[in-house]
Amino acid sequence: MTDRVKIPLFKKADLDASIGVFFDGFSKVIVAVAILLGTFGLDGGTVFGTMMPGVLVSVIVMNGGLWLYYRQVAKSRGDRNLTAVPAGLQAGRMFIWLFSIMLPVYNTTGDAVLAFRVGVLAHFIGGAVFIIGAFVVPLILKIVPAGALFGSLAGGAMAFLILQSMDGTLKMPLVGWLSLIVLFVIYLGKVNTKLPAALIAIVVGAGIAWATGAMSFSTVTDSLQNLGFYIPNFTFSIFSGEVLSAVIPFLPIVIVFSLNEVITGIQAVEQARECGDTFFTTTKPLVLCGVASMVGALFGSPLAVGLYWGYPGWKKMGSGTGYHLGIVALYALVGLTGLSAIITAFIPEAVVLPILVFVGISSYSQAFEVVSKKYYPAVIMASLPVVMDFMMDNVAEGKLQGFLAFDPGSAFVGLLVGCVFVFIIDNNWLKAAITNVVALALTGIGMIHSPGLLLTDTYSPDLGFVAVYCVLIAAFLIMHFLKFNQKSHLADLEAEKAASLEAAKQE
């Protein structure tokens, strides 16, 4: 009987899901491309001619495989409206590979191609670990205390995502800091948007960069040279002795973070179960993601893939199984043509780095969300070794120059930044504006963002932050007078109050 039910190949709601999941993943591709071209100085032929077709291969294996898998589940259950669990490029492993594996290799050797190949091999090994993890992670969680496991991961997030990315963000505050504020307003302010927050932040930041003359059309002109048709090619060079020996010291990072992403994948399926779809399994989809990583690496992709959170939203929208096919089609468009080169030419690196900062903050916060409060000290202690190692390596070599922006008056800066983000979370736009007025005044007298006070020889305020505070004052005042997002915020507060009362009754 169930075999006679016709499962739609693609329906209207699948189009929205295809675009949404694609841009969620492609925003990460934009970040990776900007870093590989900017920080590493990797050539466009490797990025757009090797990596992007390799990314497409990963997407074909994973999203195409998930389409077949969930379509079969829908047929066996006779459910033509079944929603598939989303999947795409994973931010966590992608950026850990970039900053904690590839960047150290590049800094040590000065060889961008070697660093890239090491990242690709790490992706291949990570895929194998991912497959094994699909079976053994539940056992590991019984042996290793959660506080120790997530504390170590939090340390990596703090060092390689938050601190490393903040350095670049602060070097162009008018672009980077404003992009970071946009992300926080959307995510922490709980603003409902049809487009991914990362994409919005990129568009806003890029717009500011072009308006202020930070970008040049010569970059766009140069990107046209990368247009063409690229066929995926095997990259057996990742198995050379030089690459193998270079990746060995990073195996602990590969193993730990791959296993962590397995946990994330399990949680993604749990979201579906919480929606009442208790029949979903974890092993097959996770193994498929691991296989996709390994195959993609063989074709030159260092960008990890896996299951996504967000199932409840796509189910509510009415998406089915066909949106995985739509994702493949969209990646084929940018992966085979070099079109991604033109897209990324419009976007400076300082625009995409705030996304890594936010990903790192989310990852760091997660370590405290999954353990009891009594284990917080263990989480903090477990995170310190990685952070300390990162600081010693970078400070000793005179790097992290962007941090100098927060050096003068750091205590004041910390207090002001904390206030701004508290007010963003509370949707209190007027107080956020007032806080930026205070920050502007302190900058004016040289208490922050200046090596010396007003009327002294060393007085030299950072004009980038002067501009930032002026823009934020105006923006937050406009949001206050427009009562931006107030209805949604009040609804959230009422829902939280009702949940608290319900919890109190049950106790």
Image: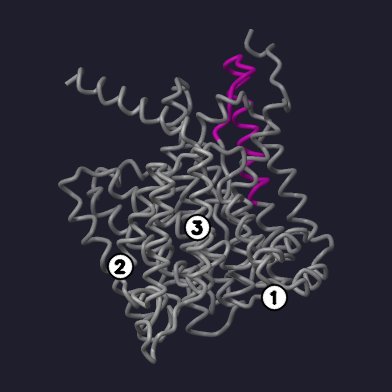
Regarding residue 122, the answer to whether it shows in the image is no
Circle 2 is placed at which residue position? 412
Along the line of sight, the residue nearer the viewer: 21 or 149:
21
For label 2, the SS is helix
Q: Amino acid at mark 1?
A: Asp
* Magenta segment includes 428: no
Which stretch appears magenta? 58-85
Circle 1 is placed at which residue position? 43
Badge 1 vs badge 2, beta-carbon distance below 8 Å: no
* Of pointers 1 and 3, the one earlier in the residue sequence: 1
Percent from the top left, x then y, of residue 32? 59, 63
Q: Amino acid at mark 2?
A: Phe
**Viewport quadrant of the C terminus:** top left
* Magenta segment includes 75: yes
* Of pointers 1 and 2, the one earlier in the residue sequence: 1
Check residue 472 in the rendering and tell me which mark sits there, or answer none.
3
What is the C-alpha distance between the residues marked 1 and 3? Answer: 37 Å
For label 1, the SS is loop
Dot 1 surroundings within 10 Å: few (below 14), some, or many (20 or more)?
some
Along the line of sight, the residue nearer the viewer: 15 or 150:
15
Percent from the top left, x then y, of residue 340? 73, 59
| Residue that sits furthest to the front in the current view | 455
Q: Which of pointers 1 and 3 indicates the residue nearer the eye?
A: 3
**Viewport quadrant of the N terminus:** top right
Question: How many numbered dots are placed on residues in this image?
Answer: 3
Q: Which of pointers 1 and 2 indicates the residue nearer the eye?
A: 2
Above or below, comparing residue 181 to residue 218 in the picture: above
Dot 3 surroundings within 10 Å: few (below 14), some, or many (20 or more)?
some
Percent from the top left, x then y, of residue 410? 31, 72
**Residue at 50%, 36% in the rendered image:** 485
